[in-house]
Image: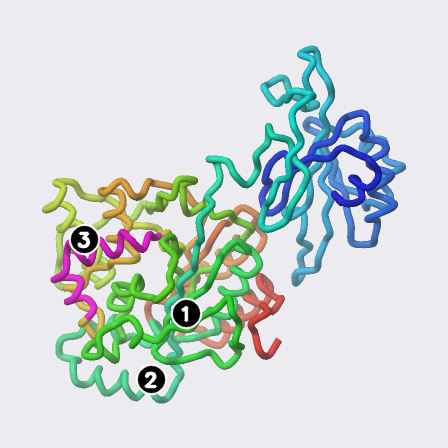
Amino acid sequence: MVDALTAAGVDVFVVARREDGLEFGIGLEDRGRALKILISSLAAPKVWLTWEDGSRSGTVALTDAVSSRSVSRARRWNIFTAYTWGDRAIGDSAGSRITFWEIGASGQRELVGTRGQERFHVESPRVPVVVDGHEYPGVATFPVGRTFEEFHGDVDIVYTWVDGDDPAWTADFNTWAALERHALLETAIDPARFRDRDELRYSLRSVWAYCGWARRIFVVTAGQVPGWLAQDERITVISHEDILPADALPTFNSHAIEAALHHIDGLAEHFIYFNDDMFVGRPIRPELFFTPNGLARVFQSTARVHGAEFADTLAVDTGALRGRELLLERFGRVVSSKPLHSPYPLRRSVMERVEADFPGIVAQTAASRFRSPTDLSIAASFAQHYGLALGQAVLGDVRTEYVHVESGRLDWALDRIAFADDVDTFCINETRDTDADHAQREARLTAFFDEMFPVAAPWEADR
């Protein structure tokens, strides 16, 4: 689009990022000519134009835009290519928005349809702007890609995953569970915690589709590699033995594995920790997870951290309670709520600080083969709260949904995600094995994943 307009002599410039695309500006006097250029250069069956004029808007095929009075008088356009994504059409969020600028009473270029400070001097220097490795024409007034409103550092994504159907892993699990069963809670060895329904494949598809800014992806496993995962420079498989001491292996404790994520060789300072049952639901930017100056965002839920421990308190709650006790002892303050069960923004340096400041409980957690009431939940809880205490994190907001597989409202919850366009992330979680409608439930989940993420990622060997 930019090449076509520039070649025809239209002065086009970058104005801002917009969702997964960019916003460009042109002079109002060039609106009619620009439309003809775009139609002649870009018109194809899949290319569409959405127009906006105050509260009014509409969408037309670009080939039909020349005859639309609404398009010719609109205050802004969005040019996009529509793609089939299962039963849905996508592409609008990655389109190129075009806004129009005219010389106003101030003698400066002003954004059409506004009365604010959206203006720039007509003699403002033209400068190249580089966004995501691509160079565009720009104006010094709009330093897109270099502002304090954007996060500019590398961001990695880390997964923990286990194939519970692997015979070797199952044999190890059964052996150690039998040896230590006297000290275990039933929830620590419930098969539901390790069931694999290909969530990792679909979660990676969601990251590929909606987080193109991620630098690298690390998948932390028990020496396992998904059969469908091909070698790809963007994904590195990390074995537990690469990050945990030999005498702590094998481990079946997510708390222990999470306690050592910062030991991943080459991991970026800023990373996002995903469980394999967490997914991205729409195009998002790194600023959702980190402030522009690099502070991690902490997404608090409404679930309270238990103030006391009882015989039936789950390990996920005792892990949060251990963190509450440490914060109270060190800072005289406590967190009242647990983090949301959503992808966790983390800083490697904060996790290193946790290990340095609390070596005893970190080592004890890493050595705990199964979940235990003595564990500290580090990556999923304590490191975030410790970051708040150290001034390395701030509270944030994310639009997320949490779905219990065993819930009687499963169908409603899945439809809420599938038909909405406002869900940043979601989690499909199973905590207890049940036999009720098992086959029907699994078929429903498979259909949901195929509907949400039907296109294979480049690293799938069987795509």
Q: Is residue 40 above or below residue 14?
A: below
Say which element carries label 3: helix
In percent of width and height, residue 373 lies at 16, 64
Q: Is residue 395 above or below residue 170?
A: above
Of callouts 3 and 1, the N-terminal one? 1
In percent of width and height, residue 210 lies at 55, 55
Residue at 54 percent of width and 71 percent of height: 446
Say which element carries label 1: strand
For label 2, count other residues whose C-alpha is less than 10 Å away and answer few (under 14), some (14-19) or many (20+).
Answer: some
Say if the magenta span includes residue 421: no
Pointers 1 and 2 in contact (C-beta within 8 Å): no
In percent of width and height, residue 298 lies at 34, 46
Query: According to the image, label 2 marks what residue?
Result: 169
Query: According to the image, label 3 marks what residue?
Result: 323
Q: Amino acid at mark 2?
A: Trp
> Is residue 413 shown left or right of residue 420?
left
Query: According to the image, label 1 marks what residue?
Result: 219
For label 1, count other residues whose C-alpha is less than 10 Å away and answer few (under 14), some (14-19) or many (20+).
Answer: many
Which region of the structure is painted magenta?
A: 346-366
